[in-house]
Image (cartoon, rainbow, N blue to C red):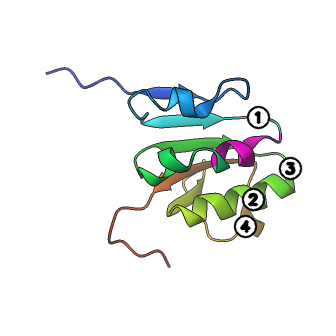
């Protein structure tokens, strides 16, 4: 039996995210917007609240790291470096992260 295709959504600052989200929710979202990541995350409340998609985010500015941490943390996302090590504070945010949904009922330390 063939596996179901993965739904992908690539964020583009010129594309209204709300319009893109009328599609079926994606399994994976990638972002590398050179400083525009937190506004996209702020506008993706519905997608983040669905607790489904994995987010791969490239961050290059310390202010964006802090803002993205706050947004992802407020939506129960566990944040990891690409080598799989969990990031436990905004000060540890590397330039590229995975943000995974924390399953319902699981408490983060």
Residue at the spot of label 1:
33
Relative vertical location of residue 6 with respect to residue 100 in this rendering, above or below: above
> Which mark, by number, is residue 61?
3
> Which mark, by number, is residue 67?
2
Q: CA distance from mark 4 to mark 1?
A: 19 Å
Q: Residues within 10 Å of mark 3 (few under 14, many from 20)?
A: few
**Counting residues from the N terminus, which is met first, the one under dot 4 or under dot 3?**
3
Depth order, front residue of 46/57: 46
Q: Residues within 10 Å of mark 1 (few under 14, many from 20)?
A: some
Say which element carries label 4.
Answer: helix
Region of the chain picked out in magenta, as a range = 35-41
Task: Answer with the quarter of the image where residue 69 lies.
Answer: bottom right
Whether pointer 1 and pointer 2 mark residues with C-beta atoms closer than 8 Å, the reply is: no
Whether pointer 4 and pointer 3 mark residues with C-beta atoms closer than 8 Å, the reply is: no
Quadrant where the image shows the N terminus: top left
Q: Residues within 10 Å of mark 2 (few under 14, many from 20)?
A: some
Residue 71, position as x, y percentages in the image? 64, 59
Comparing labels 2 and 3, the label whose residue is closer to the camera: 2
Q: Is residue 71 visible?
A: yes
Q: CA distance from mark 2 to mark 4?
A: 9 Å
Residue at the spot of label 4:
90
Picture residue at 70% right of the left edge, 55% below the top: 68
Q: Is residue 85 visible?
A: no
In the picture, measured across the screen, residue 78 lies left or right of residue 5, that is right
Furthest residue in direction top, as rendered: 2
In the picture, measured across the screen, residue 5 lies left or right of residue 89, that is left
Picture residue at 43% right of the left edge, 33% below the top: 26
The kind of secondary structure the magenta stretch mainly shows is helix
Whether pointer 4 and pointer 1 mark residues with C-beta atoms closer than 8 Å, the reply is: no
Residue 33, position as x, y percentages in the image? 76, 34
Q: CA distance from mark 2 to mark 3?
A: 10 Å
């Amino acid at each position: 039996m063939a596996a179901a295709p993965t739904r992908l959504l690539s964020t583009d600052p010129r594309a209204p995210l709300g319009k893109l989200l009328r599609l079926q929710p994606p399994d994976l979202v990638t972002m590398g917007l050179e400083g525009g990541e937190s506004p996209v995350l702020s506008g993706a409340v519905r997608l983040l609240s669905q607790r489904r998609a994995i987010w791969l985010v490239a961050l290059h500015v310390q202010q964006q790291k802090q803002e993205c941490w706050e947004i992802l943390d407020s939506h129960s996302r566990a944040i990891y470096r690409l080598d799989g090590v969990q990031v436990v504070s905004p000060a540890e945010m590397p330039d590229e992260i995975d943000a995974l949904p924390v399953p319902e009922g699981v408490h983060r330390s």
